[in-house]
Image (cartoon, rainbow, N blue to C red):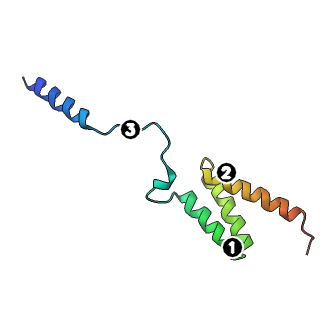
Amino acid sequence: MYRAAVYVVCASLSASAPFQCSHEPDPTLAREESPGEALYKLALGFRDSGKRDAWQETLRYIVARYPSSRWAAAASDDLRQAGAADAGAPAP
């Protein structure tokens, strides 16, 4: 009798549990930033304020510390573009 009651309770609780979605979550619905995102925004702030060394160092940190993050991919792209821009600039 006790086992049957346990099974009934477990079955009813599992039937009312929320289902997990197998798709990627919508990033616009995120409640908090990931560390990679926060650092990327910080890097953009450095860039916009003319602190080029801090900008590039922060981008390198993102790539090294969060390599599987989408922010690491964006940081790598920014570093590549900065390198291409530096290649055409005359030496001081």
Please report contact status of discs 2 and 1: CB closer than 8 Å, yes or no.
no
Marker disc for residue 73:
2
| Cβ atoms under marks 2 and 3 closer than 8 Å | no
Residue 7 sits in quarter: top left
Is disc 1 surrounded by few (<14), some (14 to 19) or many (20+) residues within 10 Å?
few
Q: Amino acid at mark 1?
A: Asp
Residue for point 75% across, 59% down: 79
Compare marks 2 and 1 and give the one earlier in the sequence: 1
* Vertical relation: 55 (above or below) 16: below
Gap between marks 2 and 3 measured at Cα: 28 Å
Residue at x 59%, y 63% (from the top left corner) = 39
Residue 9 image offset from top left, x and y in percent: 16, 32
Front position in the image: 24 or 66: 24
Earlier sequence position, callout 1 versus callout 3: 3
**Residue 13: horizontal and vertical position, in percent?**
21, 35
Q: Nearer the viewer, mark 2 or mark 1?
A: 1
The residue type indicated by label 2 comes to: Ala
> Between 77 and 24, which is closer to the camera in this rendering?
24
Q: Determine which of the numbered discs, if any, sits on residue 20 in the image.
A: 3
Asked whether, in this view, residue 29 is left or right of residue 6, the answer is right
Image x and y of residue 63, in percent: 66, 54
Mark toward the start of the polypeptide (2 vs 3): 3
* Residue designated by label 1: 48
| Quadrant showing the C terminus | bottom right
Q: How many marks?
A: 3
The local crowd at label 2, few if under 14, some if 14 to 19, many if 20 or more residues have their Cα within 10 Å, is some
User: Alpha carbon of mark 2 to alpha carbon of mark 1: how far?
Assistant: 20 Å
Q: Residue at x 46, y 59 (%)?
A: 32
SS at badge 3: loop
In the figure, is residue 3 to the left or right of 35? left
Q: Secondary structure at mark 2?
A: helix
* Vertical side of 70 occupied by 18: above or below: above
